[in-house]
Amino acid sequence: MTDSAHRLVYEELATPQEMHADCRAVGGTLGLETPLQRAARLAVRPAPSIHFDEFTSDAPKREIRISDAAARLANALHLHLD
């Protein structure tokens, strides 16, 4: 059995500094970034363009469909849907 198998559940396993270092190591392995790293990455990103010709054309608009039941209900309430 390993040393950790002999430890009691309520025993302190590590110091807060060791646990913090473990958390940072796991975050680095998972590809997570700290708020400071995120701010540094965003700070060097180029600003978005404000030129009209660099925007894409109009996005397609969603179609709104009114069911027969909704139309009957609206007509009963005198809300005329066209």
Image (cartoon, rainbow, N blue to C red):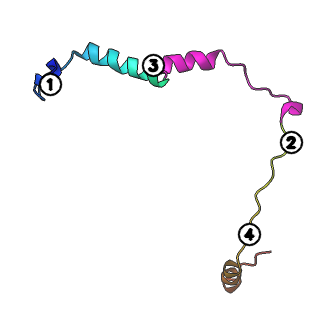
Give the CA separation, mark 1 to mark 2.
Answer: 64 Å
Residue at image position (25%, 17%) is 16
Res. 28 mark: 3
The disc labelled 4 sits on which kind of residue? Arg
| Secondary structure state at the residue bearing disc 3 | helix
Give the mark nearest the N terminus, 2 or 3: 3
Q: Is 45 on the left or on the right of 14, as rendered?
A: right
Res. 57 mark: 2
Callout 4: few (<14), some (14-19), or many (20+) C-alpha neighbours within 10 Å?
A: few
Res. 5 mark: 1
**What residue did someone put label 4 on?**
65
Give the CA separation, mark 2 to mark 3.
Answer: 40 Å
Q: On screen, 45 above or below 58?
A: above
**Residue 70 percent coordinates (x, y):** 67, 78
Q: Residue furthest front?
A: 1
The image quadrant where one finds the C terminus is bottom right
Q: On screen, 23 above or below 60?
A: above
- What is the span of residues highlighted in magenta in the rendered image? 33-55
Examine the structure image and report whether residue 40 is included in the region drawn in magenta: yes
The disc labelled 1 sits on which kind of residue? Ala
Give the CA separation, mark 3 to mark 4.
Answer: 48 Å
Give the mark nearest the N terminus, 3 or 1: 1
Give the CA separation, mark 1 to mark 4.
Answer: 64 Å
